[in-house]
Every structure is written in C-alpha cells, then in structure tokens.
Amino acid sequence: MSFDTYKEILQKIPSLKVIILFNWGEPLLHHEIFNIIKEAVSRDIYTITHTNFSIKQKPEFFEQLVKSGLHQLVISADGASQEAYEKYRVKGNFDWILNNIRY
C-alpha cells in the first residue's frame, strides 16, 4: 500500500484508536514503515506491529524504529536457540534476532 493511500484510509476513519501493522509479510520491510507509524501516532492512534525480527539492519534502523513512536512491538522469535529456531526458519540466523533486540 502506498503512503498516500494509507493516509487517505486514516482520514476516512477518524474514530480509529488502534492499528496493527502486519499481515502476510514482514512489516519492517515496507520502505515507508517509519512514516506509516509516525502518521498513525500523530493522529493519536495506538500503533502495534509484529515482526520476526530476522532482518539484517544497521543500528540506525532500530533507532528510527524507536523514534517513530511505535507503541508496541511484538517479536516472534520462533525458538530460544539456533537449533530450535532452524526448525521453523530454514537457514535462519537466531543471532540476528538477538542482536536486533539488543539494538
């Protein structure tokens, strides 16, 4: 969805109080995710997203995520060790998730 379309939808639902930004994909890969979050927050909409947090990003990315105003971040780690994680995320790297959480 384009950012302009997103803003139009928010304008049409002024009573919206909560928005959950995820479904069928990794929301943090959207090139406008920080603007999407900021727009909802600026309209006093409680903003939540879910992520598997297995994306490889620089620390600045996570700083932007925090600064966006996101109210709630749910992380689905799919395991508590590399061995368990690999059962659900083939060729996944559990250390990436841990590093991302640290950032």
Image (cartoon, rainbow, N blue to C red):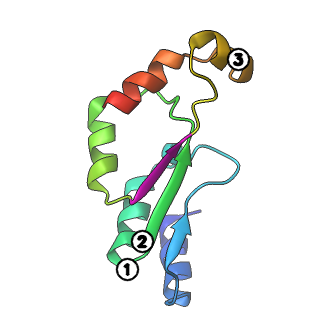
Residue beneath the point at 39% across and 32% down: 101
Asked whether the beta carbons under mark 3 and mark 2 sit within 8 Å of each other, the answer is no
Mark 1, secondary structure of its residue: loop
Query: Which mark sits nearer the N-terminus, 1 or 3?
Result: 1
Q: Nearer the viewer, residue 84 or 67?
A: 84
Residue type at tag 3: Val
Q: Which residue is mark 3?
A: 90
Distance Cα–Cα, label 1 vs label 3: 39 Å
Q: Which mark is residue 40?
A: 2
Instruction: List the residue tagged with mark 1.
Output: 43
Residues drawn in magenta: 71-75
Q: CA distance from mark 2 to mark 1?
A: 5 Å
Query: Is 21 contained in the magenta span?
Result: no
Marks 1 & 3, CB-CB < 8 Å contact: no
Rendering coords of residue 64 (x, y %): 29, 47
Q: Residues within 10 Å of mark 1 (few under 14, many from 20)?
A: some
On-image quarter of the C terminus: top left
Residue 32 appears anywhere in the view: no
Q: Is residue 65 visible?
A: yes
Q: Which percent across, then down, holds residue 18?
A: 51, 73
* Residue 86 to residue 46: above or below: above
SS at badge 3 = loop
Label 3 or label 2, whichever comes before in sequence order = 2
Residue 24, position as x, y percentages in the image: 71, 49
Packing grade of label 3 (10 A; few <14, some 14-19, many >=20) is few
Q: Residue at x 42, y 71 (%)?
A: 40
Give me the residue at 43% from left, 75% from top: 45
